[in-house]
Image (cartoon, rainbow, N blue to C red):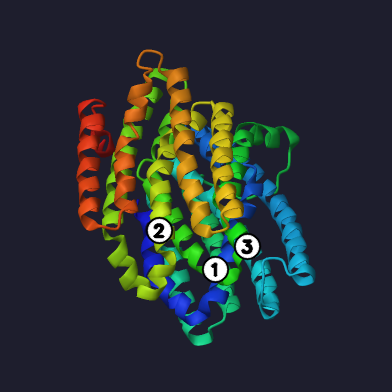
Amino acid sequence: MIEVLLGPAILFISIPIFLKQLGAEDYGIWMFVNAMVIVMQAFNLGLSFSTYKNVSIAISEKNNEQISRTLNTNLSVTVLILGVCLIASSFICLGIYNFDWFIENEEVKPRLITAIFIGMALLTGKLTEQILYNVYRAFENFKYVTILSILMKTIIVVGNIIIAVLTQNVVYVLLFSAIVTLLGIILNYKLISRFVPGYKFKFLINKKLVKHEISYSFFIWIQGIAVIIVYQGDKFLVSYKFGLAALSFYAIVATLFNHIHMAFAAMTSWVFPKMAKNKDDKEFIFDLYNRTKNISIVLSVFLLSLFCLVSKPLFTIWLGADNYLIIADYIKWFSIFEFFFIFTHIPLIFLNASDNERLSLKIVVIYAFINFSGMLIGLFVFKSITAMLIGQAISIIPGMYWMYYIISFKFDKVNHNPFVLFSLFIPSFFGSGIAFFDDYVLKLICFVCCLLSMFIFYFKLQKTNFKIMVE
């Protein structure tokens, strides 16, 4: 939780500085490159999840040799993936240079192209980091991930602020981030021997071993592609339709909510290795799913409700009154969307950890398709960013209900009740009212109704118990 909550905290401190020092257009370049790095992670074949699960299983079997094979195979395949990403980024740069893709001002061309190639170094760090961090998580030692993440983020942000103030140049800012990220890979490699004694990387591409890793990760990889296209591709749509300056303000809110979503997920992410190691005990992991699902929803809805109560003064102080007016609607509709998107956390962990990756893929593709359709209708029919977000917020609701209906129907034959499933979403509807209404009396009424409905449906009926968090 500390690891991921640090992200929104850093953003809160740094964004006004970067926006002032770099300007809207160069800040848009920064957001574009970061979005591109995230989208290119779709090429990773789901190897980080494969590492998480296969190392977790190998730990339970005390098989260090299998851990080494998993690491060598997945890191070696990552090297090949980075080659593909470099080719793809070169193609994008050719489009920018020859056809002015994503830009309105030709003067920005050299900076954007240079920034994209620096982004490939950032991508190298991200893909490698995901695999190595998941080794620590598989050992259920989250301390290393937290310490390393805090250290890296702090160094990068402090350095970026200093460079932005001194140079006002987004290329130098990204270059510093890339150098620190690559040094982080070396540090992680040195530390991995604490968990896997005597481990040394060896380039290993063996058809049988690669198939073993991808056989699990393939369906999760396709899930990742669907999620990235829908929930990161929006930045490219905004840039394409409205330019880099518009993207800078949109990306501020989108990035902040992305970190908020990850912070909520981090509260119960520890459940994955426990489910993976006990996947044959169906009764145990389904009970664990139900308990952590309720905890995740209650905590997320409560914290998001508090955020919505203070968002207007918070953002006004943070970015200034004029900038707040530009993003006010973005905050409103991203908040409403997040009240329902938080329902994805535990179900997908449960399905992917319990050998139900195909069902998980089917669910993700269907709700992502519904959600993306709503976004496209808002953007291209009503021709505004706000309309795109309204389409996103409205269309996520049926997708989430459908997901819970399918899981309940398949795994919970005794208590399969459509009304009980719908009641899980009632606090989120009241929470959405907090985000939607501007009048503080109405906000407070919705907040009280949200708390009461959580008490009725999650504590009286669902018997939510936080004891598992302590255990």
**Vertical arrangement, residue 361 with respect to residue 5, above or below:** above
Instruction: Report the disc number at residue 331.
Output: 2
Q: Nearer the viewer, residue 43 or 251?
A: 251
The answer to whether 29 is drawn above or below residue 202 in the figure is below
Give how far apart the Cα atoms at labels 2 and 1 are: 15 Å
The picture quadrant where one finds residue 456 is: top left
The furthest residue to the front: 382
Q: Which of marks 1 and 3 precedes in the sequence?
A: 3
Disc number placed over residue 21 in the picture, else none: none
| Residue corresponding to mark 1 | 246
Q: Position of residue 58 (x, y in %)?
A: 52, 33
Q: Residues within 10 Å of mark 1 (few under 14, many from 20)?
A: some
Task: State the CA–CA distance, disc 3 to disc 1.
Answer: 9 Å
Can you see residue 62? Answer: no
Task: Tell me the kind of residue under disc 1.
Answer: Ala
Earlier in the chain: of badge 2 and badge 3, it is 3
